[in-house]
Amino acid sequence: MAITPLMPVYPRSPVRPVRGEGAYLWGEGGEKYLDFASGIAVNLLGHGHPHVTKAVQEQAATLVHVSNLYGSPQGEAFAQRLVDLTFADTVFFTNSGAEAVECAIKTARKYHHAQGNPHKYELICFTNAFHGRTLGTISATNQEKMRDGFEPLLPGFKVVEFDNLEAAKAAMGPNTAGFLVEPVQGEGGIRPASKEFMTGLRSLCDEHDLMLVLDEVQCGVARTGTLYAHEQYGVTPDIMASAKGIGGGFPLGACLATEKAASGMVVGTHGSTYGGNPLAMAAGQAVFDVVANDEFLAQVRATGERLRAALEQMIPNHDALFEGVRGMGLMLGLKMKVDSRAFVLFLRERGILTVAAGDNVVRVLPPLNIEESHIREFVDGLSAAAADYKVSQAA
């Protein structure tokens, strides 16, 4: 048999973790890694955080799953917490970011259908976006590497240039239902939208009764230094997808919406067997116990500023490799002058884990509770690796 037991859809690296603690991972051979990838922005509080671990252990011993046929005191409690902390009036829980975006797309379409405008089904999306791997979410991007071989894709999506308000406005038509956008593109290269772009989209939605749908799967849940990134733009969405860090490592996502936006989502319109199960709710509550307060968010902003400053101070020493730093909070990107994916592999061999992204960027996504010692270790290791990389490239 030629195929592997695990379907070979990932180009898996030689890093094979078996244990994690804080900001570190250990491989099956005892290799130690500084984890500034955080499971692609998922392990928000690092590995084995005691409060999250205790909450999951206690819930696992109490009740794991019953399905959504029954009332959910656990789901109701976490949904109320999200409603209290955000723009939203209602929440649907999912198991992943892609599912959260799918729910957001359905919610936007159903709003217009319920208003008697079923022709308004098209979402305007943006170049280099990443919204997930389902048929719906790959239809909402122009990235050929995700679309190739899966045609015909779903209709109802129009892609225009990211951060170009005039292009977004020009794409509007009689079928437009709203805009689907990441305030900070992750996979696309840690590219924050401009304030003018985000406020402009909000104004267009208000003027034409459209839905502003935000994908905060990667940039949400304290990653950028506010609970959700849109807060820094002074913009309120109608619908928002959240996932990754919301479960601190446990598979969990959520679609948040205003009462108006969710007016079409009545009994029977959507569902999930596992979504909002008691174990996931315990994980989410534990994460929010830690991150959903001003003190923690201020710490993320301060730590992000220190990490950015340290990277910016290092870059002139290796200006043949690095072009600059961008991003918000602890969602940072190193723009490279050489192949970023090759450099990420080089870092892995030296015990530092980061993530490659589009636009030749290295994503730097550490746990939000890192300390000064982790910043020093990362920047020193990065600088040493950069020096070795220049030598290896010259050889």
Image: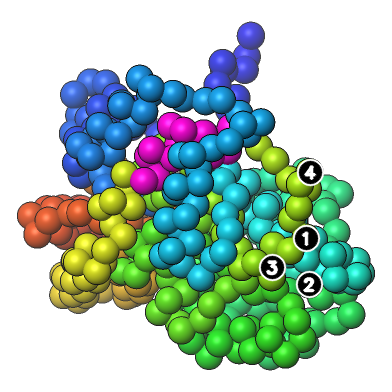
Using the numbered discs, state the Cα–Cα distance from disc 2 to disc 1 in whole angstroms.
13 Å
Using the numbered discs, state the Cα–Cα distance from disc 3 to disc 1 in whole angstroms.
8 Å
Q: Assign the magenta stretch its main secondary structure.
A: helix
Task: Indicate the secondary structure of the residue bearing disc 4.
Answer: loop
Q: Amino acid at mark 1?
A: Gly
Task: Indicate the secondary structure of the residue bearing disc 2.
Answer: strand
> Where on the picture, by quarter, is residue 338?
bottom left
Q: Which mark's residue is nearer the viewer, 2 or 1?
A: 1
On residue 177, which mark appears? 2
Residue that carries the numbered disc 4 in the rendered image: 268
Using the numbered discs, state the Cα–Cα distance from disc 1 to disc 4 in whole angstroms.
11 Å
Query: Residue 71: x, y in percent?
Result: 58, 36
Task: Indicate the secondary structure of the residue bearing disc 3.
Answer: loop
Tell me the residue at 65%/78% (across/down). Answer: 161
Q: Nearer the viewer, residue 95 or 261?
A: 261
Q: Nearer the viewer, residue 370 or 138?
A: 370
Q: Give the extent of the magenta segment.
A: 273-285
Q: Nearer the viewer, residue 266 or 106?
A: 266
On residue 171, which mark appears? none
Q: Nearer the viewer, residue 142 or 180?
A: 180
Would you place residue 305 above or below residue 377 in this image?
A: below
On residue 264, which mark appears? 1
Task: Indicate the secondary structure of the residue bearing disc 1.
Answer: loop
Would you place residue 110 above or below residue 392 in this image?
A: below
Q: In terms of sequence position, does the residue under pointer 2 or pointer 4 come before the other?
A: 2
Residue that carries the numbered disc 3 in the rendered image: 261
Q: In terms of sequence position, does the residue under pointer 4 or pointer 3 come before the other?
A: 3
Q: Residue 275 colored magenta?
A: yes
